[in-house]
Structures are given as C-alpha cells and as structure tokens.
C-alpha cells in the first residue's frame, strides 16, 4: 500500500486539482494491470468527491468523503484494499491533517509562487517534522509548485524556490502549470485525456504536464522504498 497526502495550511493552493490529476493518471496507467486507487476527500467542501461523481471518472478510482472522526479508519481500510491511497486534505491545520500525515508514505506540500504561500508551506513542513518526531519515523515530503506560468518564471518564484533550496527542502522538478484543461475537468468531470481539443485549449500540454508530475511521484516512491530497504539491512547488521 502507498498513501500520498496532499497538504497545505491554506485553501486555494491547488491540492484538489493535483490530487485529481495524480489519481486519474495512476488510474489510466493501471487500468489494464488491475491497479486500484482510493481518493479520500477530507475537505468539508468535498471537491474531489464532487469531481469523482461526475461522468468520466476512471472506474478504478473509489472516492470516499471523510471527517475528523473517521479519517484514520478510512485510510487504514483503503490501504488494505487498494494499491494507492490519495488524500486531499482541507486547507487548514487540524487533527484530520495531522492524522493523515501520520499515515503518509509521501506528503506533497502545495505552494504557489507567492511569499504568503511559501510561508504557509513552511508551516506545513514544520507540522510534518513534528509528526515525524512523535512517531519516531521520517515522513517524506516534497514541495510542488502550482499554477505556474508556462512561458516565464517570475523573479518572485525563483526567489521562493531558492529559499526552499537553501533549507535543503525537497522540491519537485515538475510544477503544475496554470492550464485551462485543469480547470475544465473540475467543471465537466473526467480526465485531461478525455477532453475535446475543439472545446478546450492546451490539452496536449496538460496531458504532458500530468504525466511528468505522475512519473516524478512514482520515482520518489521508488526511492523511498529503496531507502527503506537499506535501512532494514543496516538494522539487521547492527542487531
């Protein structure tokens, strides 16, 4: 089982869009391999579940709405039943957020190209680090820049990325670019691969962006598995 948590201490950072894109691409790639995905929506607004209930949601995605009282049980059940568990958290610091982070294989911290978002991302990272101390295990995280410009990299965004690099924070090489297609699937349902190029612009680029993001997530997960196996070997040697 693999649990991927999308977190930010503020709303509007792009958590739901990123979670939907990852879930739908993993579902597409795994359709013929019987790969199953549970999409857990811990946001009171339930935007992920609303998307999943529209036409076009891949059949190997199971959407579940949760609250603070049952989030841990729902994640644990999903981990036992499906290959990937993707958790879309609410944009605040809460017990639900802390609970989900405690189960994460990887936490994806969302950040737009503003100093306010960078400050909120730092708060989320601090929460992850605190949970790591409580559980006495490292909870892996990586920062995903969202709603970036395809044509230019503003000076402010470069400054923020350099801030994270100076702290040795892990960042995705891929960012999620501001695309009409990403907005369209939220409205109409389905995946970026299902959109009509006559009605929505930039579909090819959106598909490429989604696939690059998903590939990088999978590479990070592979690296975590390798590191975990190495750690087990060292523990055995020291015993």
Image: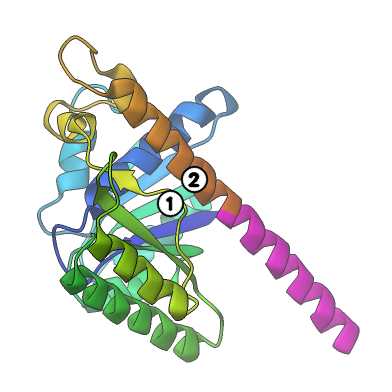
Quadrant assignment, res 66: bottom left
Provide residue 176's location: percent of width, then percent of height. Answer: 32, 46
Residue that numbered label 1 is attached to: 85
Closer to the camera, 195 or 80? 195
User: Is residue 224 found inside the magenta-colored segment of the image?
Assistant: yes
User: Which residue is found at the position 51% from the left and 29% from the top?
Assistant: 29
Query: Helix or strand or loop: what does disc 1 sit on?
Result: strand
* 236 displayed left or right of 13: right
| SS for dot 2 | loop
Q: Does residue 143 appear in this view?
A: yes
Q: Can residue 63 be seen here?
A: no
Res 21 → quadrant: top left
Q: Residue at x 39, y 45 (%)?
A: 38
Q: Is residue 29 left or right of residue 184?
A: right
Query: Which numbered disc covers residue 82?
Result: 2
Q: Position of residue 46 (x, y in %)?
A: 15, 50
Mark in the foreground, 1 or 2? 1
Q: In the drawing, does residue 236 fall left or right of residue 64?
A: right
Badges 1 and 2: C-beta atoms under 8 Å apart? Answer: yes
> How far from the left and from the top, in percent, is residue 136?
55, 88
- Mark 1 is surrounded, within 10 Å at the Cα level, by few (under 14), some (14 to 19) or many (20 or more) other residues, namely many
Q: Quadrant of the C terminus?
A: bottom right
The stretch of residues the image draws in magenta is 220-239
Cα–Cα gap, marks 1 and 2: 7 Å
């Amino acid at each position: 089982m693999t649990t991927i948590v999308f977190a930010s201490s503020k709303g509007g950072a792009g958590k739901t869009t990123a979670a939907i894109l990852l879930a739908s691409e993993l579902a597409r790639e795994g359709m013929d391999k019987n790969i199953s995905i549970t999409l857990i929506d811990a946001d009171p607004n339930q935007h992920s579940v609303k998307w999943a209930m529209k036409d076009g949601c891949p059949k190997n995605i199971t959407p579940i709405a949760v609250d603070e009282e049952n989030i841990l049980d729902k994640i644990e059940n999903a981990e036992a039943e499906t290959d990937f568990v993707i958790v879309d958290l609410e944009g605040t610091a809460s017990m639900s957020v802390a609970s989900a982070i405690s189960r994460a294989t990887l936490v994806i911290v969302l950040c737009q190209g503003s100093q306010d978002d960078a400050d909120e991302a730092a708060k989320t990272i601090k929460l992850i680090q605190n949970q790591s101390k409580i559980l006495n295990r490292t909870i892996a995280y990586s920062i995903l820049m969202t709603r970036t410009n395809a044509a230019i990299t503003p000076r402010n965004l470069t400054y923020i990325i350099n801030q994270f690099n100076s702290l040795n924070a892990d960042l995705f090489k891929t960012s999620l670019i501001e695309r009409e297609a990403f907005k369209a699937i939220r409205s109409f349902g389905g995946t970026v691969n299902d959109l009509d190029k006559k009605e929505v612009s930039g579909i090819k680029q959106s598909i490429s962006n989604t696939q690059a993001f998903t590939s990088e997530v999978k590479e990070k997960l592979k690296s975590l598995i390798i590191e975990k196996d190495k750690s087990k070997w060292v523990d055995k040697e020291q015993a």
